[in-house]
């Protein structure tokens, strides 16, 4: 439901509707940040806006529909943050862009704990249960998530195409893994050796896994400050991708 793009200039009524939709989503995000996932109920959002809960159904079909659009907006915000960091990278190489994006991802996560939880969740701690969101690929949240994934996947692909790094051959990997990687590769905009996809996935597990553990407090048993560990893992990722020299260059700036 929500807001759909118009072919021409919006009428006054359409502009008013778009403003209301935007306010509802902003209010839902504020309620989320202040009260957590349990607080994101239509009646709580309506109360914040001085509306009735039934009135919100004129703009969103359900709580789940509203959450879809809030999640999509959060992904768009995160993507814009990462793309700005990537585009400002100096020197403007895929390697420096990847390292810069990786740090920007952590910075956004540590300053947006609730929002990170809404996008990525955590076992037993997900702000929005994944079953509450539609899983079809045409949903707003799924489309926005693909844009997010494409940023890192695109940079790793560019790094490989500029200076190929060592990757395992197909026959060196478990056939069950190869089958899954091949299915995933079909969604990529360009064809790469499956070994590149395997290395990318390994690097993503390394990067995302550490950030998620930090945000959800799962490293506090050992670390009060996770940044040095993050940098150590980022350096390790740079070694795998053959870009340690550029990691050192970025560290000096």
Image (tube, rainbow, N blue to C red):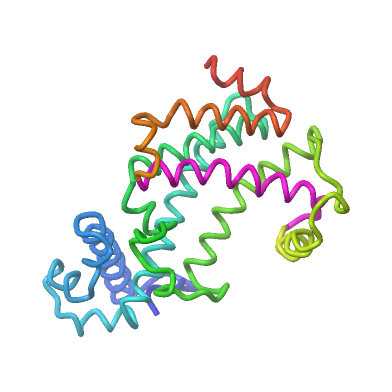
Name which quarter of the figure residue 46 lies in.
Answer: bottom left
Question: Is 94 above or below relative to 168?
Answer: above
Name the one closer to the observer, 230 or 80: 230
Q: Which residue is drawn at 14% across and 76% down?
A: 51
Question: Is 162 above or below relative to 41?
Answer: above
Q: Where in the figure is residue 68, as x and y percent of width and height?
A: 41, 70
Total numbered labels placed on residues in the image: 0
User: Going by the image, does 242 lie left or right of 151?
Assistant: right
Name which quarter of the figure residue 95 lies in.
Answer: top right
User: Magenta stretch mostly in which secondary structure?
Assistant: helix
User: Going by the image, does 142 lie left or right of 108?
Assistant: right
Q: Which residue is drawn at 47% across and 47% down?
A: 80
Residue 207 belongs to magenta span? yes
User: Going by the image, does 203 lie left or right of 242?
Assistant: left
Q: Where in the figure is residue 249, as x and y percent of width and height?
A: 61, 18
Question: Is 45 above or below relative to 188?
Answer: below
User: Going by the image, does 159 lie left or right of 152?
Assistant: right
Name which quarter of the figure residue 54 lies in.
Answer: bottom left
Q: Where in the figure is residue 219, as x and y percent of width and height?
A: 40, 39
Question: Is 96 above or below relative to 68?
Answer: above
Q: Residue at x 58, y 32 (%)?
A: 99
For this orientation, the residue located farthest to the front is 221
Residue 12 belongs to magenta span? no
Q: Which residue is drawn at 57% across and 72% down?
A: 137
Q: Quadrant of the N terminus?
A: bottom left
User: Range of the magenta residues?
Assistant: 189-216
């Amino acid at each position: 439901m929500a807001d759909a793009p118009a072919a021409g200039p919006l009428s006054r009524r359409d502009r008013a509707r778009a403003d209301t939709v935007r306010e509802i989503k902003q209010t839902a995000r504020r309620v989320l940040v202040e009260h957590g996932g349990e607080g994101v109920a239509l009646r709580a959002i309506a109360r914040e806006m001085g509306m009735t809960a039934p009135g919100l159904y004129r703009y969103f079909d359900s709580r789940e529909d509203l959450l879809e659009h809030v999640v999509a907006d959060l992904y768009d915000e995160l993507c814009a943050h990462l793309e700005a960091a990537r585009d400002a990278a100096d020197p403007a190489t895929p390697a420096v862009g990847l390292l810069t994006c990786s740090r920007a991802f952590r910075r956004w996560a540590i300053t947006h704990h609730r929002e990170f939880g809404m996008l990525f969740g955590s076992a037993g701690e997900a702000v929005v249960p994944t079953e509450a969101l539609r899983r079809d690929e045409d949903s707003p949240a799924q489309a926005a998530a693909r844009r997010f994934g494409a940023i890192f996947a695109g940079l790793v692909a560019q790094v490989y195409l500029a200076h190929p790094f060592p990757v395992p051959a197909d026959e060196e990997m478990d056939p069950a893994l190869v089958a899954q990687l091949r299915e995933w590769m079909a969604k990529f905009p360009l064809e790469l050796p499956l070994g590149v996809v395997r290395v990318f996935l390994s690097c993503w597990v390394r990067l995302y896994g550490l950030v998620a553990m930090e945000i959800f407090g799962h490293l506090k048993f050992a670390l009060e400050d996770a940044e040095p560990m993050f940098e150590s893992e980022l350096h390790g990722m740079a070694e795998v991708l053959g870009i340690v020299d550029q990691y050192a260059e970025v560290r000096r700036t």
